Image (cartoon, rainbow, N blue to C red):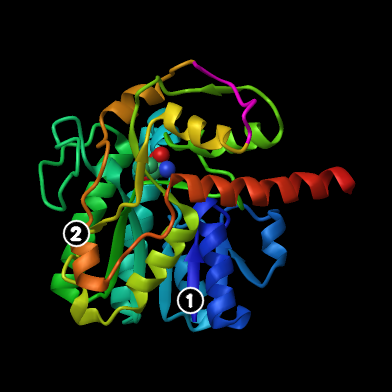
Amino acid sequence: RILITGAFGQLGSEITDELRTKYGESNVVASDISKDHPKAKEGIFEYLDVTDAERLEEIVEKHGITQIYHLAALLSSVGESKPQMAWDINMNGLVNVLEIARKRNLDKVYWPSSIAVFGPDSPKQDTPQNTIMNPTTMYGISKLAGEKLCEYYHAKFGVDVRSIRYPGLIGWKALPGGGTTDYAVDIYHKAVNNEPFECFLAKGTALPMMYMDDAVRGTIELMEAPAEKIKVRTSYNFSAISFTPEEILASIQKIVPELEMTHNPDHRQGIAESWPQSIADDHARKDWGWTPEFDLDRMSEDIIKNLREIYYAQKEA
Ligand code: VAH
């Protein structure tokens, strides 16, 4: 049975739905720190603050958990406003999950890392799997430390923990929670509501990005791969597309020509500039057959189609 932490977050919402569809609702336990979320009524739910090791053990025991998808964390932008809390949640949450996996010999653990583990002196284009990594955000520091901790728990205790360095994830089912790539979700909502879009990043700021459908599929493919294929036990580089704000604008304008964008860079500009512009994911492709399916235009078509249905349904309601 699978436990998901951070199940109501941007990624958690989508992975929870997919795992319930794939393995059956009774085999997936969603947990989150927000109790009164509408998704708490869909399937099995447990309140969990991942820094509470006892509560985590109680849930694992009660439900006979054999796998944990540990998605609870503070992202890059919100992490810079509360760096001590970001370290506490991101690191102690992970320690608690790895410890329970070790003590109870769980089958597998999934834990997301990020391209935020790279810093200003990492190569900007086609950033390789192994290179200079001097992150300048607390989020990136916690992810880099987390990768080393995962590698240690696998080498020393045999914990089968697997990880992916996600680029910016873009989906329509759930809103993002405090990241630097959130602008690329917000722009679609403005497009379908015929509102002007103000971008918090400057023109020309390219970042690695991926459609949520690709990220969810790739994550589950990694978790279902035979253990002997997983050669990277820090975290796999993962890539699909890379674009600037004006490139995603142009893609959306093919469907919503009247969409307009202005720029008003804020503190997230500095974070974005410290990150790579594109990622080389040859190890994921070679070790477990990763291939993305969505390019920018196909992603735009899919998101706008789905958001229009949602907003239309809301107007009719
Ligand atoms: C963030 N969406 O912006 C996350 C992600 C690469 C970006 O880690 O913090």
Q: Predominant secondary structure in magenta?
A: loop
Was residue 259 drawn as part of the magenta stretch in this picture? yes
Can the viewer see residue 30 in this picture? no
Which residue corresponds to mark 2? 282
* Left or right of residue 56, residue 224 in this image: left
Nearest the eye: 59 or 212 = 212
Q: Position of residue 133 (x, y in %)?
A: 15, 41
Residue 116, numbered circle: none
Stretch of the chain drawn in magenta? 256-263
* Left or right of residue 49, residue 227 in this image: left
- The residue at 43%/59% (across/down) is 214
- The residue at 72%/65% (across/down) is 41
Residue 112 occupies quadrant? bottom left
Residues at badges 1 and 2 in contact (C-beta under 8 Å)?
no
The crowding category of the residue bearing disc 1, from other C-alpha atoms within 10 Å (few below 14, some 14 to 19, many at least 20), is many
Q: Position of residue 108 (x, y in %)?
A: 34, 76
Q: In the displayed orientation, state which residue is furthest to the right.
A: 317
Q: Is residue 146 above or below residue 121?
A: below
Q: In the displayed orientation, state which residue is furthest to the left.
A: 131
- Secondary structure under tag 1 reads strand
Nearest the eye: 289 or 137 = 289
Was residue 207 drawn as part of the magenta stretch in this picture? no
The crowding category of the residue bearing disc 2, from other C-alpha atoms within 10 Å (few below 14, some 14 to 19, many at least 20), is some
**Foreground label between 1 and 2:** 2
> Disc 2 beta carbon < 8 A from ligand 1?
no
> Disc 1 beta carbon < 8 A from ligand 1?
no
Which tag, 1 or 2, sits closer to the chain's start? 1
Can the viewer see residue 68 in this picture? yes
- The residue at 48%/45% (across/down) is 297
Spatial CA distance of label 1 from label 2 is 29 Å
Which residue corresponds to mark 1? 2
* Left or right of residue 295, residue 227 in this image: left
